[in-house]
Amino acid sequence: MTNEIDDEIVEAIRRRRQAHAESLDYDLKRITEDLQRQERESGEPVVRRPSSASQAASRAETINGLADVRLSVRPVIEALTRLGLVSAGTPSRCRHPR
């Protein structure tokens, strides 16, 4: 697509959005309700974002998984220290270089 065609599409979308908002007196509640009604009536699938609660649960699972990894590495570090392959002063946590 060329920029000219892109501009035409963008302008058409803006005109449609403006006319829609104007027809509902720029009332955000009415605009939202109308758009949701159109989605329902279209029969097309609508993608839903996961709720913030499910995103927080996912982050907690990741953090718990990292804690499990850190706990499982500790015996390895202790064994390497006993064998003299790692000095006792070696930090047990890896630090990301910045």
Image (spheres, rainbow, N blue to C red):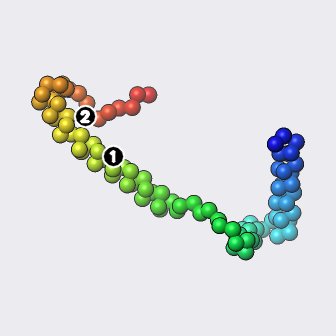
Residues marked 1 and 2 touching at CB (< 8 Å): no
Q: Quadrant of residue 43?
A: bottom right
- Rendered position, 26 above or below 95: below
Left or right relative to 80: residue 41: right
Q: Which residue is mark 1?
A: 66
Q: Is residue 19 left or right of residue 32?
A: right
Sequence-first disc among 1 and 2 = 1
Identify the residue at the far front of this view: 1
Find numbered disc 1 in the image and state the secondary structure of the residue it sits on. helix
Q: Position of residue 33 (x, y in %)?
A: 72, 72
Q: Nearer the viewer, residue 76 or 20?
A: 76
- Give the Cα separation between the discs numbered 1 and 2: 14 Å
Query: Residue at image x 73%, y 74%?
Result: 41
Residue 86 visible in the shown view: yes
Which residue type does callout 2 highlight? Ser
Amino acid carrying label 1: it is Leu
Is residue 29 visible from the viewing direction of this image?
no
Quadrant of residue 36 within the rendered picture: bottom right
**Residue drawn at (85%, 60%), measured in percent from left and top?**
16
Identified at 82% across, 70% down, the residue is 24
Q: Nearer the viewer, residue 72 or 19?
A: 72
- At 35% from the left edge and 32% from the top edge, which residue is drawn? 95
Task: Give x and y (percent) for residue 61.
Answer: 37, 55
Q: Is 89 positioned to the left or the right of 5 in the image?
A: left
Location of the N terminus by quadrant is top right
Write down the residue under mark 2: 92
